[in-house]
C-alpha cells in the first residue's frame, strides 16, 4: 500500500510537480469541452483548489484519478455553453454530444486509458468504449476513420503544446498558491515572557564588620603558613634529636623500645646425666676397638663382592694423548 504524502516541504514540491504536469492538459480539455476559455480557467482553478487540500493525506498514485474526477465533475463541463467556440481544425468536437466529447478529450487530450477514464467518469469500461466509439470520426462509408482520428489527436496535442503565454502565467501563479496552501509555513510559537522577580534591596554592610573580618584573616594567615612549614620540615628531615635514623626504602624498621631478656646458658655437661641408657650405649660404642672397622663396613662389603680395584691416581697423568700417526723420533732423525 502506498504511503500517503505528508505536508512536509517534500510533499509540497511533489504537489507542485504534479500540478505542473497536468495543468496544461486540464486547461485544454476543459476549454475544448465547453468551447469557453474563461470558463475552462475557472473550472481548472476550482479543481486545483479542491485537490490541493486533501492531496496531502492521499497516496500519490491516486492523485491523477482524483484530480480528473474533480475537473470532470464541474457543472460547466457537464453542461457546455451554447455559445462555445472551436477552431476549424477541431470542428468535429462541436458536433459531438457532451458525454462523447468528454470521453474523447480524456483519451486524446488527458492521456487516460480506458480503465482510468471510465473510473473518472464513473461509468463502466463498456459504457466508456461505447461513448468513445460514438465520438470517433467516420469516413464516407461510415467506418472509423483512422487518419481523421490521428489528425484530431495531433491538433489537440498542439493546443497543449502551444498554450498562450498569458494562460501559462496564470497557471504558474495558481500552482504556486496551491503549493503554498498545501504546506503553510509554521511559525514558531513565541516563548512565554517571564517577568523577573523584583530585586530585594540588601542593607549596606557596616564598616566595623568588614574590618573585623580582615583582622581575623591577617591573624590566621601566619598560623596557616607555620603549619605548612612544620609539615614540610617533618616530612623532609623527619627525625627528632636522639631518635633513630629513618630506615631505607624497602627495609623493615621498628622504632619501638628495645626489650632485653636473659637467654638460658648454652653450656652443656661433658658427661651424660646418670640414668640415661642411651648415653651409656653411646659410650660403649665409642670404646669398642673395632669401631673404625665397622665405620668402613660398606667398603669392605663392596671389596669382598669382587669390585674393581680403584685406579692409582698417585702418579701424574699425561695432559693429552699423542696422536696415533706421530712418528717416533730417533737419534738418526736428528742427523
Image (tube, rainbow, N blue to C red):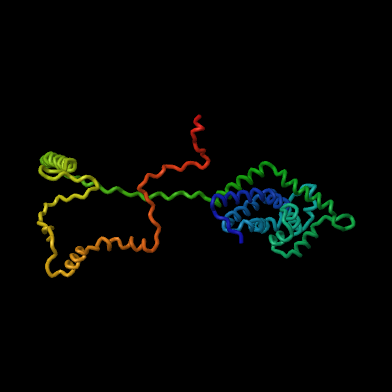
Is residue 80 in view from this perspective? yes
The residue at the point 11 percent across, 54 percent down is: 259
Where residue 63 appears, as percent x and y from the top left, is 63, 56
Where residue 96 appears, as percent x and y from the top left, is 78, 56
The residue at the point 75 percent across, 48 percent down is: 157
Is residue 210 in view from this perspective? no
Where residue 137 appears, as percent x and y from the top left, is 83, 55
**How many badges with numbers are in the image?**
0
Q: Is residue 57 left or right of residue 287?
A: right
The residue at the point 10 percent across, 54 percent down is: 260
Q: Who is closer to the viewer here, 212 or 318?
A: 318
Q: Residue furthest top?
A: 335
Q: Who is closer to the viewer here, 321 or 230?
A: 321
Q: Is residue 191 left or right of residue 225?
A: right
Image height of 102 relative to 87, above or below = below
Q: Residue furthest front?
A: 332
Quadrant of the drawing holding the N terminus: bottom right
Amino acid at each position: 500500500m502506498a504511503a500517503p504524502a505528508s505536508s512536509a516541504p517534500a510533499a509540497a514540491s511533489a504537489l507542485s510537480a504534479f500540478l505542473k504536469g497536468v495543468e496544461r492538459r486540464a486547461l485544454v480539455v476543459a476549454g475544448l469541452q465547453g468551447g469557453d476559455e474563461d470558463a475552462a480557467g475557472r473550472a481548472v482553478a476550482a479543481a486545483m483548489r479542491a485537490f490541493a487540500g486533501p492531496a496531502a493525506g492521499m497516496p500519490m498514485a491516486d492523485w491523477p484519478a482524483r484530480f480528473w474526477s474533480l475537473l470532470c465533475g464541474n457543472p460547466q463541463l457537464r453542461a457546455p455553453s451554447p455559445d462555445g467556440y472551436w477552431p476549424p481544425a477541431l470542428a468535429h468536437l462541436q458536433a459531438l454530444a457532451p458525454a462523447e466529447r468528454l470521453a474523447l478529450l480524456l483519451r486524446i487530450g488527458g492521456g487516460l486509458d480506458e480503465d482510468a477514464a471510465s473510473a473518472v467518469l464513473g461509468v463502466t469500461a463498456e459504457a466508456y468504449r461505447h461513448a468513445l466509439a460514438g465520438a470517433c470520426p467516420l469516413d464516407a462509408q461510415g467506418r472509423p476513420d483512422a487518419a481523421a482520428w490521428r489528425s484530431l489527436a495531433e491538433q489537440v496535442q498542439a493546443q497543449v503544446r502551444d498554450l498562450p503565454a498569458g494562460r501559462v502565467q496564470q497557471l504558474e501563479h495558481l500552482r504556486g498558491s496551491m503549493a503554498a496552501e498545501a504546506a503553510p509555513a509554521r511559525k514558531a510559537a513565541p516563548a512565554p515572557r517571564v517577568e523577573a522577580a523584583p530585586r530585594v534591596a540588601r542593607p549596606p554592610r557596616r564598616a566595623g564588620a568588614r574590618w573585623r573580618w580582615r583582622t581575623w584573616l591577617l591573624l590566621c594567615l601566619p598560623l596557616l603558613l607555620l603549619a605548612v612549614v612544620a609539615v614540610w620540615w617533618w616530612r623532609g628531615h623527619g627525625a627528632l634529636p636522639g631518635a633513630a635514623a629513618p630506615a631505607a626504602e624497602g627495609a623493615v624498621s621498628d622504632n619501638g623500645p628495645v626489650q632485653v631478656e636473659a637467654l638460658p646458658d648454652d653450656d652443656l655437661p661433658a658427661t651424660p646425666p646418670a640414668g640415661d641408657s642411651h648415653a651409656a650405649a653411646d659410650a660403649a660404642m665409642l670404646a669398642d676397638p673395632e669401631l673404625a672397622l665397622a665405620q668402613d663396613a660398606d667398603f669392605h662389603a663392596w671389596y669382598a663382592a669382587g669390585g674393581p680395584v680403584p685406579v692409582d691416581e698417585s702418579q701424574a697423568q699425561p695432559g693429552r694423548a699423542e696422536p696415533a700417526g706421530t712418528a717416533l723420533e730417533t737419534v738418526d732423525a736428528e742427523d
